[in-house]
Structure formats: structure tokens, C-alpha cells
């Protein structure tokens, strides 16, 4: 059984040692959920390549190394280490160090009436019944074991509530910083976004490594959008090359609502972002796009599922990536059109640029259609830099490496055009150009 493996047993031992001190301990419903999460995880163990959705990504590194639950850290953090797309206090910001909320580094003031933003730990004290109503409702235990592990060990996170008609003009930024105390540590934050009818906000996740210590970040986000609500949700992952970053985002999108998200993966030795969106109302719009740039022996995985459950839904997915050295990238994108989801319009594109003979891309776009009045398409391409374009740039006097960098930047910048928010687009573009500058 999975529980007999040393890796699984270490989490059982940690749960016994820390369960009574985790936030919300003593709340019967939460204690029950945590125990159910651990039980589910112990029974199933980590996902393996024998499972179709994990065919190209192995979690063997998690089985080889033990990660202890990250402690609360009060060490000072230089302001320059905290990224933002809106300098000068132009955003509402929550900062987490080692998965724990740091109010001294955060600024959640100035929210409009109808919007509340608080840490999960605070919410479990102030309004536990409100958390109980939504925690684990979209990210269910049976989805996969990492969700169960997150639920068992969740120590903090975010609760963003938007009342009917509430619009938040400034972006909400969530900054997750890895600690660098030299010990392999794990954290399991949970993000809850609950937007009622016609509410709107921009949410940005930053995942940043402050040092080179090994760490395991297991992030789960649950998003519920009411009728006509709009959420722009962007994420940039730049953790250290000793990190393992696994994230799962589930979104339930109501009638005429819009969910717009973009993922940029640049860091971590092993990263996977899994997005699952259910378009459960008519006239919904879902855009799930992303980009990645990896080198060395990095492994990155973007896996998505867009489930059209009702008629007249629209989805668009564009994912582009650059792979250098012996790195490996995975794209798995699936669109399901249910029998009642007539007039669905779905589009999916995956493009990869291979910069070395040892770079590898595994691309698996899928359409699963059970309705007959739909318009759906998908495509995937992989290739090298265009020799003719390189020759043209070099003939204009550019050195080879400069010419290559320009073509790579142009390829990835094109993917960023899927981001409608200019400040986010420029921030992500600067991060990509920084990655190119490290080559």
C-alpha cells in the first residue's frame, strides 16, 4: 500500500505531530476534512505516469526527499524581493513567506465596499462558517491526491469575496516567497475566490524563490464566478531551481461570466500547473493561456481541462514555450463539449520552440465533443529557430546570440498578447527578457 512507502509515512507522521496546531484545529468540520484528506492521500499515494493525465510527468523527486512542514518565519524580507506589477502602492497585496501570511509585508487597505480580502487563517477565526461553505467544493478530494494532501496540511491562504456588482479597480497581488533556511520545507496554501453576480477583479499570483533551498509548494485555488462576473487571473512562477511547484486551479464559471487566466512558468526544477474550468452557465467565456521557458534539466507541465457544460460557451487556449538544454515540457489540453452545450466555440493552440537537440516537448491536445452544433479546433506544432530569420538578423550586423535572443523573445512575446491587462503583460515580458539575459 502507498502508506508503507517512506515518503507517504513521513506525511502521516507530520500530520500526527502538527494537526493540533494547524489553523482552525478544533473546528469539527475542518478536522474531519483534514483527516479525510490525509486518508485519501495515504490510500492513493502520489500520482504516477501510469495514470493518463500524469503520463509525461513523474513525481519521483517527491518520493526521494522528505519535506517538513514549513515553520512560521518572522525574518525581515527586503522590499526589493517582493515583486509587484503596480509599484508605489498601486495594488492590494498579501505576502506569504514559506506559505505563512506576513501582514507586516502586506497592504490590503483601500478595498471598495463589497470586497473583503483576508488570509485563510484570519477567515477561519472570523467567519469559519463562510469558509466551510466553500472549502473543497470545487477542488474535491477525488480529483487527485495532491488536492487531498493540500487539504490535510493547509496552513494558510487567501479568501477573496466580492459581493454583487463589486468592482475592484486595483489588482490584488498574492506574493508567495520561499524561505531560505536551508531545510527542505513544504507548504500547502489554499486560495478561495468567491465572486457574486457582475463582480470584477484582477488577481495576480507571484511565486518567487528567495534562495536555493529545496522546497515543495502545493498550491490549490478554488474560484466560483456568479452570473456576469469577470475575473482576470494571472500567475508567474519563478521559484528556485531546487524547488518543486505543483498547482491546481479549479474554476466554476456562471452564466455570461468571464474567466481569463494566463500562466507563466520560468522557475523550479519540476513544475506543473493544472487548470480545470467548468463553464456551467450559458454564454460563458473562458480564456486559459500560458507560456514557459525552461533550460538545463527543468521539467514543466501545463495541463488543462475546459468543460463546456451549457450552450453558447466560448473558450480560447494558447500556450507557447521555449525549451533549451535537456529540459522537458508537457502540454495537455482537453476541451469537453457536453451533449447540451450546443453553439460552443472552442479554440486551442500549442506551439513549442526547441533550442537544442536534447530538448523535449510532449504535446497532447484533445477534443471530446458530444454535441453536433459546435465550432471547435485545436493544433500543436514544435520546431526550431528559423534559419532564414537568423540569417537576416545576422546580415544586419547582429551577433548570433543576440539574433537568437530577439527571435526567442518575439516568439514568447506573441503569447503574452493574450493578456489584456497592460501592466501584467509588461511585467511578464520583463521576466521573460530577464530569463533570456541569463542564457
Image (cartoon, rainbow, N blue to C red):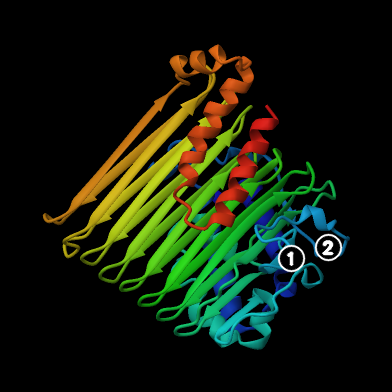
Identity of the residue drawn at 49% across and 71% down: 136
Residue 347 appears left or right of 229: left
Above or below, 130 relative to 285: below
Density class for disc 1 (Cα within 10 Å; few <14, some 14-19, many ≥20) is many
Identity of the residue drawn at 66% across and 56% down: 11
Q: Can residue 335 be seen in this view?
A: yes
Spatial CA span between label 2 and label 1: 8 Å
Residue 367 picture location, percent across and down: 26, 46
Residue 283 appears left or right of 53: left
Residue 271 vs residue 152, the one in the foreground: 271
Q: Disc 2 designates what residue?
A: 73
Identity of the residue drawn at 64% across and 66% down: 154
Residue 51 appears left or right of 234: left
Q: How many marks?
A: 2
Residue 83 picture location, percent across and down: 71, 55
Q: Residue 112 carries which label?
A: none
Q: Can residue 38 be seen in this view?
A: no
Residue 261 picture location, percent across and down: 47, 57
Residue 151 vs residue 228, the one in the foreground: 228
Residue 52 picture location, percent across and down: 38, 42
Residue 125 vs residue 225, the one in the foreground: 225
Circles 2, 1 touching at the beta carbon (< 8 Å): yes
Residue 393 vs residue 248, the one in the foreground: 393
Q: Name, please, the residue furthest toward the left.
A: 372
Looking at the rendering, in which quadrant would you find the C terminus? top right
Ranked by sequence position, the earlier of labels 2 and 1 is 2
Density class for disc 2 (Cα within 10 Å; few <14, some 14-19, many ≥20) is some
Q: Which mark is residue 100?
A: 1
Residue 426 appears left or right of 412: right
Label 2 element class: loop
Amino acid at each position: 500500500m502507498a502508506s508503507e512507502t517512506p515518503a507517504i509515512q513521513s506525511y502521516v507522521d507530520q500530520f500526527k505531530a502538527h494537526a493540533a496546531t494547524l489553523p482552525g484545529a478544533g473546528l469539527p468540520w475542518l478536522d474531519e476534512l483534514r483527516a479525510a484528506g490525509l486518508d485519501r492521500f495515504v490510500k492513493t499515494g502520489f500520482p504516477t505516469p501510469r495514470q493518463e493525465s500524469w503520463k509525461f510527468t513523474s513525481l519521483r523527486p517527491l518520493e526521494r526527499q522528505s519535506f517538513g512542514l514549513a515553520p512560521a518565519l518572522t525574518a525581515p524580507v527586503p522590499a526589493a524581493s517582493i515583486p509587484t506589477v503596480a509599484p508605489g502602492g498601486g495594488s492590494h497585496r498579501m505576502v506569504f513567506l514559506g506559505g505563512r501570511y506576513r501582514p507586516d509585508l502586506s497592504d490590503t487597505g483601500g478595498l471598495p465596499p463589497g470586497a473583503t480580502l483576508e488570509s485563510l487563517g484570519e477567515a477561519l477565526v472570523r467567519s469559519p462558517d463562510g469558509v466551510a461553505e466553500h472549502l473543497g467544493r470545487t477542488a474535491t478530494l477525488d480529483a487527485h491526491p495532491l488536492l487531498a494532501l493540500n487539504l490535510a496540511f493547509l496552513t494558510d491562504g487567501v479568501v477573496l469575496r466580492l459581493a454583487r456588482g463589486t468592482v475592484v479597480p486595483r489588482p490584488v497581488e498574492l506574493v508567495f516567497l520561499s524561505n531560505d533556511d536551508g531545510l527542505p520545507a513544504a507548504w500547502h496554501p489554499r486560495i478561495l475566490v468567491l465572486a457574486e453576480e457582475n463582480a470584477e477583479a484582477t488577481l495576480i499570483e507571484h511565486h518567487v524563490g528567495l534562495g536555493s533551498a529545496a522546497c515543495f509548494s502545493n498550491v490549490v485555488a478554488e474560484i466560483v464566478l456568479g452570473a456576469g462576473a469577470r475575473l482576470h487571473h494571472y500567475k508567474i512562477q519563478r521559484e528556485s531551481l531546487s524547488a518543486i511547484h505543483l498547482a491546481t486551479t479549479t474554476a466554476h464559471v456562471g452564466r455570461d461570466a468571464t474567466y481569463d487566466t494566463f500562466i507563466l512558468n520560468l522557475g523550479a526544477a519540476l513544475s506543473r500547473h493544472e487548470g480545470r474550468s467548468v463553464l456551467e452557465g450559458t454564454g460563458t467565456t473562458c480564456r486559459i493561456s500560458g507560456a514557459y521557458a525552461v533550460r538545463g534539466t527543468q521539467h514543466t507541465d501545463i495541463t488543462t481541462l475546459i468543460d463546456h457544460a451549457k450552450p453558447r460557451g466560448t473558450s480560447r487556449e494558447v500556450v507557447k514555450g521555449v525549451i533549451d538544454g535537456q529540459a522537458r515540457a508537457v502540454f495537455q489540453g482537453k476541451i469537453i463539449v457536453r451533449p447540451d452545450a450546443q453553439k460552443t466555440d472552442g479554440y486551442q493552440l500549442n506551439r513549442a520552440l526547441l533550442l537544442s537537440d536534447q530538448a523535449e516537448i510532449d504535446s497532447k491536445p484533445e477534443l471530446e465533443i458530444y454535441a453536433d452544433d459546435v465550432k471547435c479546433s485545436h493544433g500543436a506544432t514544435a520546431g526550431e529557430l528559423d534559419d532564414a530569420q537568423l540569417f537576416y538578423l545576422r546580415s544586419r550586423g547582429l551577433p548570433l546570440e543576440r539574433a537568437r535572443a530577439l527571435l526567442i523573445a518575439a516568439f514568447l512575446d506573441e503569447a503574452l498578447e493574450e493578456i489584456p491587462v497592460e501592466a501584467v503583460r509588461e511585467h511578464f515580458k520583463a521576466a521573460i527578457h530577464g530569463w533570456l539575459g541569463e542564457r
